[in-house]
Amino acid sequence: MTYKDLADLIFPNAKNISYYEEKYPKRNLPEGAVVARVAPSPTGNVHIGTIYQGLIARKMADQTKGVFFVRIEDTDQKREVEDGISQIIQSLKNFDIIPDEGMTSADTEIGNYGPYKQSDRKKIYEAYAKYLIEQGKAYPCFCTPEEVEEIRKKQESAKIRPGYYGIWAKCRNITVEEAIEKIKNGEKYIIRFKSPGREDRKIKHHDIIKGNVDFPENDQDIVIIKADGLPTYHFAHAIDDHLMGTTIVTRGDEWLSSVPLHLQLFQELGFKAPKYAHTSTLLKNDDGNKRKISKRKDPEAAASYYVEEGIPSGAVKEYLLNIANSNFENWRRANPDKPINEFDFQINKMSVSGALFDMVKLLDISKIVISKMSAEEVYEKSLTWAKKYDKELEEMLSDKDYSLKVLGIERGNKKPRKDIAKWSDVKENIIYMYDDKFLNKDQEYQYQVINNKEEIEKILKLYLEKYYNENDDKDTWFNNIKELAGELGFAKEVKEFKQNPGKYSAHVGDVSTVLRIALTARINTPDMYEIMKVLGKESIAKRFEKALK
């Protein structure tokens, strides 16, 4: 009996691999075009690392007129969560990382190299597993989980390297006849790869990010087809990346140690291996110690966090590119208004060591991104967010014309105000501009230099009676406040106040502060002239009246 007899017994209906080699021909792309992918597993909340990898892959494909696709690696079905695939697709969509090919929902896909969900590719894996068995490069293993565990315990006791290899690979040298007999007797089995490697030999590998790396050869006879008939990640990814024409695999550096195995699989399958780029782990500063960002400990590790908080996808992508390429920050400084797709991303310039994930910096970037948006854009995005997460804000924004005026304060000029970092900040930033919210709430007025009740009353009453005109331009408006200060015995200029210590109890800036606090109950606000223009005389009068009470 031959290896072919064994292969035919195990996979009687599997097609010859030539069928799939013809079905998925080499892609017709320009020279140097990158075919890259993001290939997450639907096993829980989508990690920000998936967005990071997707962004990098999308950038490389765009810059080289290549292809970016999404593949779902769902062969570990015990860990799969409900709606896991939908979460992945929606998360990528939330960050405008749209694939050219791949899964577009839990049940739909686009592209000619699918299926793009591994659980739908079972027949393909069977064909290649059968091919390896025919070549004597894979074999059925009849060891029970208990026997494998016993092997591991013996290795641990002897303080030797754990695994299924060499003399520990009990089923490696079973004859074809023995294997066929066991299968016919109904014994359960899995399929293992028969590694040709030796641990005492080294391989040299060039990683696009890490550079030249030496590894011991792989000698482990890993499982390639599990008891449920589905492949392991190692086997599936090699076949998929070959048939889908992947040229560069970007993944986290926790996979770096798998390179010897993966290169060996490609070689034994007769495939050309893609280039590998192992990105640095996203780290977090935890009381002075750096640790891997964790979905269990850090809310910002989940891609959904940014949607729930209302941090614009553009800001997150800006920040991730900042982490990815150290020259991005200088490029952005030199090109403040250019879209990020014009940035020339270089994968070989990515950091070799861990990248520190800094939420403070991300929010600073987000403030800049939002400050450049029009009032209309801020309104639409805030409203979309509020409809899902904040009913009170949604109700406030129901008067679109007024809300656009509020959101337009200090927007669209050379130095726009940078006070909103996320849509969840909007309500707190504008709520005082809505009379039904402001007038019906007890306010705390923290007057500063001028805090005498009678002086405050004089300022507010005289300002409305004599110095306020809603048609004034900004210069006239401020000159009127100067005149108000002078009439009440305060310095009309700050300079004058400083030059005559003891002569004045306050200056025009302090008078402005009284007006600001009476209007808003806040010490710091955007431009008060613009606030007054939006509020109008009737609202200003009601607010002064409330303050006086």
Image (cartoon, rainbow, N blue to C red):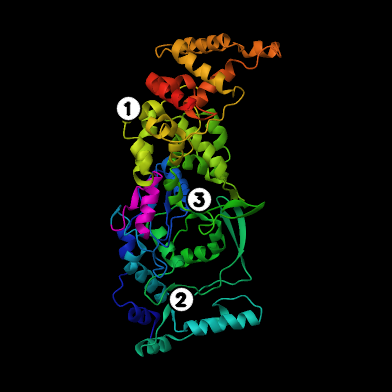
The residue indicated by pointer 1 is 401
User: Which residue is at 71% across, 14% downward?
Assistant: 502
| Disc 3, SS | helix
Mark 2 or 1, nearer chain start: 2
| Disc 1, SS | helix
**Residue 483 x, y percent position in the rendering:** 54, 9
Label drawn at residue 329: none
Residue 170 in view, yes or no: no
Within-10-Å neighbours for mark 3: few <14, some 14–19, many 20+: some
Label drawn at residue 192: 2
Look at the image and give the residue range highlighted in magenta: 84-107
**Residue 139 x, y percent position in the rendering:** 44, 79
Left or right relative to 512: residue 342 = left
Residue 28 in view, yes or no: yes
Within-10-Å neighbours for mark 1: few <14, some 14–19, many 20+: few
User: Which residue is at 47% across, 42% downward?
Assistant: 317
8 in magenta:
no
Within-10-Å neighbours for mark 2: few <14, some 14–19, many 20+: many
